Amino acid sequence: MRDEGFVCPLCGGSEGEVALYLTPPAPLSDAERGEPSSIDRHPPLRAGEGGRGGEVHTYPLLRCITCNLLRIHPQPTDEELAAAYSDTYRPHTRPGLSGKAKGWLEQRSVRQLWRLLGPPRRVLDVGCATGDLLLAIRRSGNPNVTGVEPGERAATIAHSHGLDVRVGMLEDAAFDDASFDTIILSHTIEHVRDPIATLREIHRVLAPGGSLILWLPNGDSIEARVLGRRWIGYDPPRHLTTFSTATLTRALETTGFRVTQIRHEAVGLEWVWAFRYWLRDRAPKAERAIAPLHPLLIVAATPLAAIGALTKRSGRIRVIGVR
């Protein structure tokens, strides 16, 4: 099946073929979860199947037949996206051990990338959520940090930590040319409606010789191939575009960046969520029972993720580009 109404933001191609049909999860009932249900407590359950009860919205994921970029089409409406980023959106509300594990990973990333994040570099995090990564940079010794976050609740949390976070999209902030030396897009580029326009704006506000650091799902990964519609890297409707290393490299080069590093990370997160989604559909009470073990399960699944990292086909990648 081809959709000729499709327009690829990367190459301008006008034809796409359906790669998958993606479906957000049916929420657990109040009785099963023990709290008010919300599809946003966890990333999407699965795709291409109806879920348990109720009408489920399906989003076609199209592959551009010219450049292979993956893109949800038709795009979700603003109303659908607003519902998907409700106040219970999990990346903004990680409690307990899960939140501590996320903080440890961010601090490790700061140490690894300190040459790009340390003073006197001016650092901008686009889609900074509650500002945890900016806080880690500031605590490590660089106060020159700024964020942009479209979610008002997440931005309010960041403000409570004394962070300079602008509410809205990057273009809304209207920064001057060459305002920053390092810009971060941590699991952000897949969320924006026009990733090429976003990269062009980043190029404008980044100083010559400055660095762009991206973390994102890899659509050409072992996880994407093996887990298929249960791979959380697709995350409909929030993830509007799914990049591979090839399509991301093309996007960066098109917008004036030179790719200097592609790092394939070994994190068992995707394998654990796929298992939990499979279990939730068949034994929801069991899935709820193992939820507190989530961080430990991620550690246990890390050897699976290491296979992708060693073969340079992992589900999560870190890419560095230079202006």
Image (spheres, helix red, strand yellow):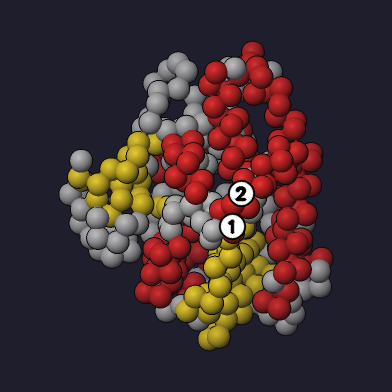
Foreground residue, 180 or 175? 180
Answer above or below: position of 323 versus 143.
below
Answer above or below: position of 215 versus 251.
above
Q: What is the number of the mark on residue 199?
A: none
Q: Is mark 1 on a helix, strand or loop?
A: helix
Rounded to the nearest angstrom, the CA distance separating label 1 from label 2 is: 7 Å
Q: What is the number of the mark on residue 309?
A: 1
Residue 135 screen position, x and y as percent: 75, 61
Can the viewer see residue 40 in this picture?
no
Foreground residue, 241 or 159? 241
Quadrant of the image for the N terminus?
Answer: top left
Residue found at the very far left of the displayed protein: 4
Can the viewer see residue 20 in this picture?
yes
Left or right? Give the position of 7 relative to 107.
left
Left or right? Give the position of 201 relative to 164.
left
Residue 218 screen position, x and y as percent: 49, 55
Answer above or below: position of 7 versus 323.
above
- Give the residue drawn at x 72%, y 58%: 106
